[in-house]
Image (cartoon, coloured by chain):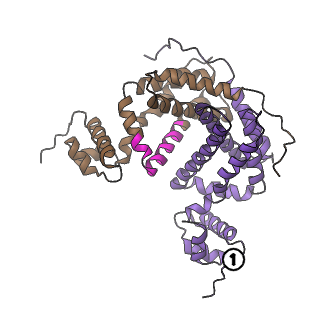
Chain colours: A purple, B brown
Amino acid sequence: MRVSRWEPNARGRLEQAALELFAEQGFADTTVPQITARAGLTTRTFFRHFSDKREVLFSYEEQLPGVIATLMSEAPAHLTAMEVMDRGLGTTVASRFEGQREYLMKRQAVVLSDASLRERELRKLSILSAAIHAGFLERGLSDLDATIAAQVGVTVFDVAVTRWLAQDSGRALPELFHETLEAVRNLTSAASAAPQAPATAPS
Amino acid sequence: MRVSRWEPNARGRLEQAALELFAEQGFADTTVPQITARAGLTTRTFFRHFSDKREVLFSYEEQLPGVIATLMSEAPAHLTAMEVMDRGLGTTVASRFEGQREYLMKRQAVVLSDASLRERELRKLSILSAAIHAGFLERGLSDLDATIAAQVGVTVFDVAVTRWLAQDSGRALPELFHETLEAVRNLTSAASAAPQAPATAPS
């Protein structure tokens, strides 16, 4: 066997092959050897890059927490939490995702087709949330505010990406991100919340 | 074997026995026969109530989506989304959870101890979110606003319950819920978001 130790863009080829096979024949019915055969690579190469076939779909997101941490620590100190998210997270999302829309649309269809992938996707969002939470603690927010800001950030991230993938109007991701963030603001500030009322309990 | 078909409070006894065993010897090392032995019931009774040992910990929450749907449809039409959450969800949470704090504290420790339980807990939150989303669509919100409101509601629910379980000040859950909702409002309205700026991209 001649297995060259350096396979040009092995990771990308494996991701592409896996996604094609998942889409064609289903996630559950696809095996690692099928993926490597399609990519023209060995299973050994596969396992140098991924722990299992599921992780192929979550590969690029592993870098996001580190990217987020850097962006948040570099954002000017005077920015509000919402501004940090709008610039930092919006920019991160945009720069990472723009140009990958076709790939991400296919990926999303596969993730939605399988319960274990949907659970893994939720865990990805909670990992993102933890990264944003840590970043806001570093910026001096209270634990409560950092927790809330992180959840709002992840929600806006998730909703904006979903809208971006679903639309056919060609609007840019940062624009959708900004608009979604504004929708959160409008919704939560629509009126003063009810005072701690003697609530009319449903009988 | 004499197995009476009617076991008084079998469900509650199984939940209590399971939680004790999970806490004592770990979730992974606990079997269904151990749970039923502790509860003085048969495995057949167990499987009449639960599909597996994991679901014992998520039992009471299965009713929440239905409760939420009812409360949301009954809330007066003039209430804002935030008010519906504060009264409806705050009230729901309070009435269901008050009085179960000891149980829920133990349950939380078990859930946090096991990766598969943490994933299941995330799924629970996404089921809750779907219920709130549906309720807001019924109330005439746009899909975007309903999605955001649902995520905010679930976040506040999760954060308020976590704070309630962690505190030792004895504050009531509805109060913590209201305060958390206010924190969301303050955080998101702190300043106008940055305009779609010529962002100074990190080099």
Work out whether residue B145 or residue A65 is closer to the camera in this orientation and state it.
Answer: A65
Residue under the image location 68 percent in, 72 percent down: A10
Percent position of residue A28, x then y: 52, 63
Quadrant placement of the C terminus of chain A: top left
Image-based side of B133 in relation to B17, left or right: right
Q: In this figure, which residue is indicated by the disc labeled 1?
A: A7
State whether residue B177 is above or below residue A179.
Answer: above
Percent position of residue B2, x then y: 12, 44
Residue under the image location 81 percent in, 34 percent down: B194
Percent position of residue A68, x then y: 69, 47
Chain to which the residue tagged by mark 1 belongs: A
User: Magenta span has B114?
Assistant: yes
Image-based side of A28 in relation to B152, left or right: left
Work out whether residue A69 or residue B178 is closer to the camera in this orientation and state it.
Answer: A69
Percent position of residue B191, x then y: 76, 27
Quadrant placement of the N terminus of chain A: bottom right
User: Magenta span has A158?
Assistant: no
Residues in magenta, as a range: B109-128
**Dot 1: what SS?**
loop
